[in-house]
Image (tube, rainbow, N blue to C red):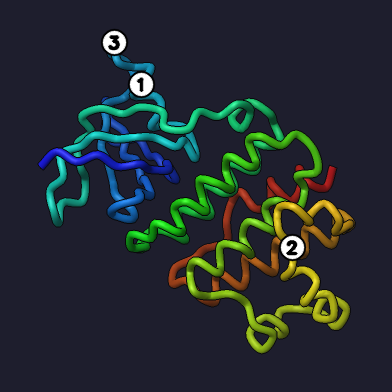
Amino acid sequence: MLEKVRGIVVHTVKYGDTSVICDVYTDKYGTLGFIVGSPRSRRSVTRSLMLSPLAILEIDFDYREGKNLLRVKDVRVDEPYRSLPYQPIKETIALFLAEFLYYTLRNEQPNPQLFEFLVDSLLWLDNRDRRLANFPATFLLRLTRFLGIWPNEEEITPLLSGDEARMLPLVLRMNYGTMHLFRFSATQRSRLLKVINDYYRLHIAGFPELKSLAILREVLSQ
């Protein structure tokens, strides 16, 4: 059955010599796995879109219920980025978010509100050029609401020091419009990201230590 979905690319891996497997979080089916040819043919431009972290696409595919890997018929950019793949700091944030979402959304069911939150957040990041250091922490905290794991003090306080615990109510109020008002030191911001990552590990089975977290913390400390 031919289907059309909007989707966000969260992970890619080479499959054999001529194909790539892409994990995509979609608006209608949750996370789906697609197999596409490597970008070597005349259609290399469109197929390479599937390899871009956090690319927001419109995908036509042959849907087979219960099949792990689905064949793509056509793919188009649904929301083009202006700067996200091209600016070093934004690219680092995007690579971190892609890895984070890959492990967070692996078994996630369709959730239109979550999908729209992800799209809106990525486009917000793409269209801002300054004061982005608090975006990753703000995004991860906002995401917990859609996953049903919004932090409460009893759960998260054991991960914090005394001073950090006293700051918690303020940190939980951060949003994209106010996050620039929170003036963390590089050490505090790095620590915040570590605590949030540990919190997700408590709630999501198989959630690992992320390889990209150390890189992000280093970049944001500069």
Residue 53: x and y, percent?
49, 37
Tag 2: residue type?
Answer: Met
Element carrying mark 2? loop
Q: Closer to the camera: disc 1 or disc 2?
A: 2
In the picture, the quarter occupied by the C terminus is top right
Sequence-wise, the earlier of marks 3 and 2 is 3
Decide which of 40, 15 is in the foreground and name it. Answer: 40
Q: Where 74 falls versus 215 (above or below)? A: above
Residue at 72% in and 70% down: 172
Tag 1: residue type?
Answer: Thr
Distance from disc 3 to disc 1, alpha carbons, whole Å, reads 9 Å
Decide which of 97, 40 is in the foreground and name it. Answer: 97
Q: Do the residues labelled 3 and 1 touch (CB within 8 Å)?
A: no
Q: Where 172 falls versus 69 (above or below)? A: below
In the picture, the quarter occupied by the N terminus is top left
Distance from disc 1 to disc 2, alpha carbons, whole Å, reads 37 Å
Residue at 71% in and 79% down: 159
Q: Please rate how many residues cluster around mark 2, counting C-alpha atoms within 10 Å: few if below 14, some from 14 to 19, many from 20.
A: many
Q: Closer to the camera: disc 3 or disc 2?
A: 2
Q: Are marks 1 and 2 in contact (CB under 8 Å)?
A: no
Which residue, as the protein is rendered here, is positioned at the far left? 1
Mark 2 lies on residue: 174
Element carrying mark 1? helix
Q: Please rate how many residues cluster around mark 1, counting C-alpha atoms within 10 Å: few if below 14, some from 14 to 19, many from 20.
A: some
Tag 3: residue type?
Answer: Arg
Mark 1 lies on residue: 46
Mark 3 lies on residue: 42
Residue 218: x and y, percent?
76, 47
